[in-house]
């Protein structure tokens, strides 16, 4: 076998409180497309950022073509031959295509930029990728797909031996993906090693020769794509062997009767948003827990955000209690009794510098308007009751929320919505990143709420959890709801995993 | 290719509007007032606004990176004060004083840029502190106006460089034109200049593309400091005095000139030519008002404010419509 | 005790007052003359009242993460309008004339504030840019109103606002106190304060809990303009004249400074009205001190520069990280590298 162009041994990277990479080995051969797979928090982004010089490594060795390499910064990584194209195009939208290709290394004549030479080289560069565009036009006058290709052109133009593509396809449509893959195959023929990160399993199987799977910051294994089935891949990413899952499923399915008889609280028909989630149907009944299962980036969050009006749907209708409504924004959704706990607690949920009490009453207060304040006594009552009920620690309602641990922050967020007494509670990854005890408490809470008549939309990457709680499970893959399965006792994690992997409707 | 052509044109809209405005103002002035349509009126625009042009050029660099420099007026005042004090009270030669003043301005700008970059404090508050500091330093030198009688300064003030057609320019105007030309070359034809645009377009991208972000950011503030100090030197020639109350509100004029010149306040988009046109618009407003005779000087402010409003709303409409 | 948010501004204020005692031994003396209170402390309150008002409005704007540069112009416009109306009125000394003048000034301020607010919240212009427009044009408008002159008036009821006494205390102090009280009541006894802090602290989360951020944002700019207008009335009333050029000059900068000294972060979020009042008093005391010590009053600017930089450095996380890193050499005291934490790339 030939020598790898890039080899990483025992890579370690620690962030305060988190060991993001724990002794990861990784190798990349010239002329291959190599997929880096793993769920959220597996360490994919960290590995990429270490390789591209954004984060310094805390331990381990990197060798490039057999020689040791110390990566100190983005520029130095580029000079060493590792170029990166990120999901959000990291070029300057305000500059021309030609400038974006060559900025920092423009050809010069007598100290000044040699514009005609720059233009000629840029044209040659984009022509090399079969791209016919005006290189003097501003970058932002082109579609994201073209911008992505320009980024790739820039990356390979710096004599890249290794090209890292971090989720390049997440905002491209099918034709654009085809165009991108054509370019990738051409680069592969030229001997460039491509590291490809994508949440789209089809794409991985279509383009990649080999894959490395990470889980919880550790290496799970390296496989040739043709040697590993999609089901095996998914189970390795999620981290449960199929046998384990089967035994778990036997005891975990819901025993409560399906509340089919009640009239639905919310009915969504053909609800969709271009580039986020393809149109889907969903019915939520009082007392029903609907789970959404799918890999990270499969469109789970996007589907939920439409129901809350956090993003505007561009197709479909929503009926709440039988009346058609346009969910024009969160305020409208809240008015209908819908609540939404975002998966991104810090950026979209909590106001870090406010206290636990203030964060808990925020949604209720917002819906009352500023002129009808909750009295301090009422606020304290709410805060203390929910601190006790959910065992939020520290139990001080005046503690600043940003100083709480992830699990406790999640509970604060839950408490915020529970005091608004919602009819439909949307929980996006409520148990991610929190310890096992808190996880069990939250699961118990969700089951209890449903028994009292609340509808819950429960989103989680952990299949066991979804199975344990849900009456009905929507399975997502590649921004599409591919199946809606009734959790009638016969459903196992294996079924769900197969559905995710195959995309077939059961 | 139609879409890219449209996009290209859209980027030029503010510049086009400014040019049309300028031509319209000059035409209306020429038709309305006797003696308006003359080469010297145009040249006087340059002579009277030489210092503003130099300061606005420096401001253009800062705004292109997405920053702002509120200290320029104060640095101008400090430069006039230091010049006057050294020349009059200590009889230092002009050839020593001017480089020293330029060094002080550049140093102040550099320091502000360093603080902005290192501590990630908003540029507006850092340069506000710089403004307080520079104005305050003026008064520690002298609370009164210090007038200059030094022959080399008066010579600079009175020299007229004759041009064909009986018109003339002042040395300051020539310096201002040279500064603008040099800035044009730097912004549009050097790597540093393009890095300024890249930084204004997307700091994160600039970092990831391996551009020298720290150096670029600090340098633009140093350039603005240098230009302010040079503007101060030119103002000293013009006023023949140093005073802590010189150039009050100049920062607003400079910002207005840059914005009216079509540069986006969010950074990354604009042309140096636009700034020159912007300064010309401001100067022309004053000229028209002085020719008009009955309109009072405060109409200048109101018109500038109205133009600012127009251009800022225009900018929002243009950026909002850009495909993302 | 040093943990309390008002500790530092209060400590600075007390230290400055004590420093004055060193130069003028009878600094703290307050005596009554003709039923009026006199003394340096009263002067500080009296002359500081307009700044307190402007800072009050500025605090609310800054709490939402914005800034209002136009307050100085609003001060000038309000004073100019009121004085113009009174000077043209047939009966400048009557209470009704003065009330109409005040109402006129406040109404115009409402409009100006609404324009600022709508530019920021609806059109999405950066606050500093949106309010810059009025900052530039407003001075011209004020001079247009006064026709470039200084309008002097004689009107006892108007004089009361900024220069008169009521119950032995300067009326302006009472007025400022009342407005501070009203603002405290409005923000802390209703949910307004909480919602403002939420919008400033995390705009995205605020939208997702259903807070009407647009409306709140517009409201704070209106409040800021009204506060500035009242300050403008005070300033013009105190000298019985309106000066479109110099009234309220640089007051926006002093107000921002007062807010920052008072412990409200320029990034928005938590605000402290008490802190702002202390901050404004610190600035006024600084001016008074410099004046009594006999330093040229203009050099206060240098001190202000020092204060701005110090306060901002203390608020800057990067600076604190650097300072603590240098102090703690023991292992475990390491901070995450801020530069890399700022790179948010991909997922």
Image (cartoon, rainbow, N blue to C red):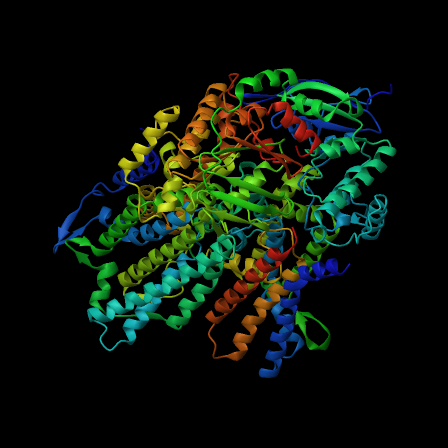
Name the one closer to the observer, A312 or A453.
A453
Residue A206 picture location, percent across and down:
78, 33
Can residue B237 be seen in this snapshot? no
Residue A256 picture location, percent across and down:
47, 26
Name the one closer to the observer, A482 or B59.
A482
Residue name at image x 81 percent, y 31 percent: A161
**Relative to residue A484, is residue A116 depicted above or below?**
below
Can residue B310 be seen in this snapshot? yes
Residue B70 picture location, percent across and down:
51, 52
Which quadrant holds the N terminus of chain C? top left
Picture quadrant where residue A217 is located:
top right
Residue name at image x 46 percent, y 74 percent: B296
Which quadrant holds the C terminus of chain C? top right
Residue C189 picture location, percent across and down:
28, 44
Picture quadrant where residue B176 is located:
bottom right
Name the one closer to the observer, B144 or A501.
A501
**Relative to residue B219, is residue A418 depicted above or below?**
above
Residue name at image x 22 percent, y 52 percent: C174
Looking at the image, residue B127 sits to the left or right of residue C258; the answer is: right
């Amino acid at each position: 076998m030939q020598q790898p162009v890039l080899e990483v041994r025992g890579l370690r990277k620690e962030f305060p409180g988190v060991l993001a990479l724990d002794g990861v080995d990784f190798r990349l051969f010239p002329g291959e497309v190599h997929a880096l797979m793993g769920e959220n928090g597996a360490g994919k982004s960290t590995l990429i950022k270490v390789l591209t010089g954004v984060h310094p490594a805390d331990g381990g060795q990197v060798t490039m073509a057999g020689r040791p390499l110390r990566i100190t910064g983005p520029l130095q990584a580029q000079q060493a031959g590792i170029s990166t194209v990120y999901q959000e195009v990291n070029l300057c939208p305000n500059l021309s295509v030609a400038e974006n290709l060559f900025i920092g290394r423009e050809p010069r004549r007598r100290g000044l930029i040699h514009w005609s030479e720059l233009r000629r080289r840029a044209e040659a560069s984009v022509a090399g990728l079969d791209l016919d565009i005006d290189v003097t036009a501003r970058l932002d006058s082109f579609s994201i797909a073209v911008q992505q290709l320009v980024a790739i052109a820039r990356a390979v133009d710096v004599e890249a031996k290794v090209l890292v593509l971090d989720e390049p396809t997440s905002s491209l449509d099918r034709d654009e993906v085809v165009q991108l893959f054509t370019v990738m195959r051409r680069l592969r023929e030229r001997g460039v090693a491509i590291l490809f990160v994508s949440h789209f399993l089809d794409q991985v199987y279509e383009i990649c020769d080999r894959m490395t799977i990470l889980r919880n910051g550790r290496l799970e294994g390296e496989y040739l794509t043709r040697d590993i089935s999609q089901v095996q891949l998914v189970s390795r990413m999620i981290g449960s062997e199929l046998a384990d899952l089967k035994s778990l499923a036997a005891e975990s399915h819901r025993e409560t009767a399906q509340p089919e008889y009640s009239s639905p609280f919310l009915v969504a028909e053909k609800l969709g948003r271009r580039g986020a989630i393809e149109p889907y149907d969903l019915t939520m009944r009082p007392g029903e827990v609907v789970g959404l299962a799918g890999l990270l980036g499969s469109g789970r969050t996007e589907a939920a955000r439409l129901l809350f009006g956090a993003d505007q749907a561009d197709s479909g209708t929503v009926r709440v209690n039988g009346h058609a409504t346009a969910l024009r924004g969160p305020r409208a959704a809240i008015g209908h009794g819908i609540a939404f706990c975002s998966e991104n607690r810090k950026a979209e949920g909590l106001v870090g510098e406010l206290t636990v009490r203030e964060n808990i009453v925020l949604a209720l207060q917002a819906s009352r308007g500023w002129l009808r304040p909750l009295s301090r006594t009422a606020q304290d009552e709410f805060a203390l009751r929910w601190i006790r009920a959910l065992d939020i620690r520290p139990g001080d309602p005046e503690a600043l929320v940003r100083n709480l641990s992830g699990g406790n922050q999640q509970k604060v967020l839950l408490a915020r919505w529970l005091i608004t007494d919602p009819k439909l509670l949307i929980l996006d990854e409520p148990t991610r990143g929190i310890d096992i005890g808190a996880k069990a408490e939250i699961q118990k809470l969700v089951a209890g709420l449903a028994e009292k008549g609340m509808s819950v939309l429960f989103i989680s990457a952990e299949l066991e959890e979804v199975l344990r709680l849900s009456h009905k499970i929507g399975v997502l893959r590649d921004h599409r709801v591919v199946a809606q399965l009734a959790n009638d006792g016969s459903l196992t994690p294996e079924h769900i995993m197969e559905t995710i992997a195959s995309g077939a409707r059961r | 290719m139609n879409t890219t052509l449209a996009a290209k044109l859209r980027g030029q809209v503010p510049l086009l509007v400014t040019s049309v405005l300028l031509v319209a103002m000059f035409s209306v002035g020429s038709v309305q007032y006797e003696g308006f349509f003359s080469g010297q009126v145009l040249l006087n625009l340059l002579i009277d606004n030489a210092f503003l042009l130099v300061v606005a050029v420096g401001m253009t660099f800062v705004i292109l990176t997405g920053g702002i420099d509120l200290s320029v007026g104060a640095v101008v005042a400090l430069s006039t004060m230091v010049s006057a004090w050294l020349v009059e009270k200590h009889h230092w030669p002009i050839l020593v004083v001017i480089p020293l003043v330029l060094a002080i301005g550049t140093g102040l700008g550099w320091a502000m840029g360093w603080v902005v970059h290192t501590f990630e404090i908003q540029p507006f508050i850092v340069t506000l502190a710089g403004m307080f500091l520079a104005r305050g330093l003026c008064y520690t030198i002298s609370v009164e106006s210090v007038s200059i009688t030094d022959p080399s300064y008066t010579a600079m003030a009175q020299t007229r460089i004759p041009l064909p057609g009986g018109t003339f320019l002042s040395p300051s105007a020539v310096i201002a034109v040279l500064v603008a030309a040099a800035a044009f070359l730097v912004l549009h034809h050097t790597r540093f200049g393009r890095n300024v645009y890249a930084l204004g377009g997307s700091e994160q991208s600039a970092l990831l593309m391996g551009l020298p972000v720290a150096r670029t950011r600090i340098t633009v503030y140093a350039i603005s400091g240098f230009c302010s100090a040079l503007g101060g030197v030119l103002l000293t020639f013009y006023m023949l005095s140093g005073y802590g109350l010189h150039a009050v509100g100049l920062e607003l004029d400079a910002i207005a000139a840059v914005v009216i010149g079509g540069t986006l306040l969010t950074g990354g988009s604009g042309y140096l030519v636009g700034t020159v046109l912007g300064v010309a618009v401001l100067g022309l407003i004053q000229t028209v008002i002085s020719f008009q005779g009955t309109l009072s000087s405060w109409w200048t402010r109101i018109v500038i404010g109205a133009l600012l409003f127009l251009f800022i709303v225009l900018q929002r409409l243009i950026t909002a419509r850009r495909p993302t | 005790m040093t943990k309390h948010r008002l500790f530092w501004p209060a400590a600075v204020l007390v230290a400055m007052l004590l420093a004055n005692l060193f130069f003028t031994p009878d600094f703290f003396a307050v005596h009554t003359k003709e039923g009026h209170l006199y003394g340096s402390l009263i002067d500080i309150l009296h002359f500081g009242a307009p700044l307190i008002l402007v800072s009050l409005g500025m605090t609310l704007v800054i709490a939402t993460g914005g800034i209002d540069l136009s307050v100085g112009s609003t001060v000038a416009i309000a004073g100019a309008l009121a004085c113009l109306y009174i000077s043209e009125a047939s009966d400048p000394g009557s209470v009704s004339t003065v009330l109409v003048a005040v109402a006129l000034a406040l109404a115009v301020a409402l409009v100006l504030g609404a324009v600022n607010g709508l530019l920021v919240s609806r059109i999405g212009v950066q606050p500093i840019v949106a309010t810059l427009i009025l900052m530039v044009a407003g001075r011209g408008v004020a001079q247009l109103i006064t026709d470039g002159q200084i309008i002097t008036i004689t009107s006892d009821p108007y004089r009361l606002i900024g220069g008169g006494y009521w119950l032995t205390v300067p009326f302006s102090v009472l007025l400022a106190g009342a407005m501070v009280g009203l603002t405290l009541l409005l923000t802390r006894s209703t949910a307004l304060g909480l919602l403002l802090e939420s919008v400033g602290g995390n705009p995205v989360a605020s939208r997702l809990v259903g807070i009407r951020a647009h409306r709140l944002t517009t409201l704070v700019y209106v409040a800021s303009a009204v506060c500035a207008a009242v300050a403008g009335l005070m300033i013009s009333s105190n000298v019985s004249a309106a000066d479109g050029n110099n009234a309220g000059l640089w007051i926006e900068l002093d107000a921002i400074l007062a807010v920052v000294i008072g412990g409200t972060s320029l990034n928005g979020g938590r605000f402290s009205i008490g802190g702002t009042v202390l901050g404004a008093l610190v600035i006024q005391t600084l001016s008074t001190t410099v004046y009594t010590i006999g330093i040229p009053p203009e050099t206060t600017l240098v001190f202000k520069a020092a204060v701005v930089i110090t306060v901002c450095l203390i608020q800057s996380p990067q600076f604190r990280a650097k300072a603590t890193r240098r102090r703690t050499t023991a292992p475990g005291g390491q901070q995450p590298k801020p530069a890399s934490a700022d790179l948010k790339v991909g997922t």
